[in-house]
Amino acid sequence: MEIRSGTATINDDVTLYYEDIGSPGDPPVLLVMGLGAQLLLWRNGFCERLVSQGYRVIRYDNRDVGLSSRLDGKRADGGLATKVVRSYLGRPSPSVYRLEDMADDAAALLDHLNIDRAHIVGASMGGMIAQIFAALHQARTATLGIIFSSNNSAFLPPPAPKALLSLVRGPGANAPRETVIDNIVRVGKIIGSPGYPVTDQQLRADAIESYDRAYYPQGIARHFDAVLGSGSLTRYDRKITAPTVVIHGLADKLMRPSGGRAIAKAISTARLVLFEGLGHNLPEALWDDIVGELKSTFSEATI
């Protein structure tokens, strides 16, 4: 699989690292990953399946993660507990940047690649970014795929406390490498798919790859603030006109299935696909099924 890599300058503060896979002449698919997650979580094998179906795949690191720009030292006002309560009520909070800014990052990346229109696929926080993108950039959105995400509408059931705390209470920026890797493995076990378990050996190998490529826990906090800073996304969902598939796991303890159901209810063009045993990851055993659902939706629009 040929991978072309590069960087795109978005503005004075942000440069995005991206990888471009497949034939430049094929219909493009933009993959948007979630909170604190590097493009690595769009696994090569998953991307290969899309490429083999005749698509050009672009995956990238969001701002503040991976090899993209880090907004070092920038902090938002307000306490976390207050922001979480406001989020439960569907209300926004102060943040360094919002999901809207990250959606504009995605649009600027497409500009850099001279892509007018693409299939947009987002996972977790990336699914939130994708919803905003599809609403604000309707002409550029051929179809929309949203995987284990939410629209943060008011009064949705919150994440399981253990799952949420596993993300927001990491070992810290100065923790030893092995401590961080152990924690990444622990988080993977907590939020992963009980119906499709990953071996400890694979979890550790993935954790080592992630740490050695780019460990930057400060970015996770700003990503979390971006989610809390945008509030409910239902106002965007009502504007989406692109064919949409919402994919969610019934065993997801971080983004409850109610989040996926809320998105599907709010987007008039959406269909909902639920998988038994799927948690908050993309297990290899389901790659063909998920790609099949995405391709079915892709086929509803031409580029």
Image (tube, rainbow, N blue to C red):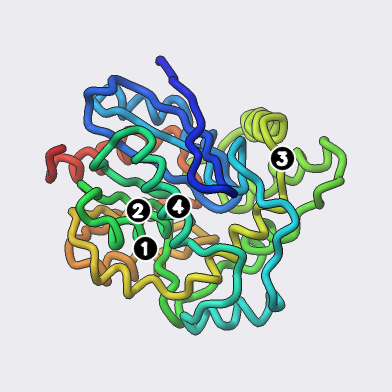
Q: CA distance from mark 2 to mark 4?
A: 8 Å
Q: Amino acid at mark 1?
A: Gly
Kind of residue sitting beneath label 2: Ile
Q: Quadrant of residue 3?
A: top left
Please indicate whether residue 23 sits to the left or right of residue 76 in the image: left
> Where is residue 32 shown, x and y percent of the image?
43, 45
Q: Which badge, 3 or 2, is on the more N-terminal residue?
A: 2
Between discs 4 and 1, the one toward the N terminus: 4
For disc 3, the marked residue is 215
Q: Earlier in the sequence, mark 3 or mark 1?
A: 3
Under circle 4, the secondary element is helix
Query: Closer to us: mark 4 or mark 1?
Result: 4
First reached walking from the N terminus: tag 3 or tag 4:
4
Other-residue count near label 1 (Cα within 10 Å), few / some / many at <14 / 14–19 / ≥20: many
Residue at horizontal 36 percent and vertical 63 percent from the top: 260
The quarter of the picture where the C terminus appears is top left
Q: Please state if 172 lies on the left or on the right of 168 as rendered.
A: right
* Residue 260: numbered disc: 1
Give the side of residue 120 with respect to residue 84, left or right.
left
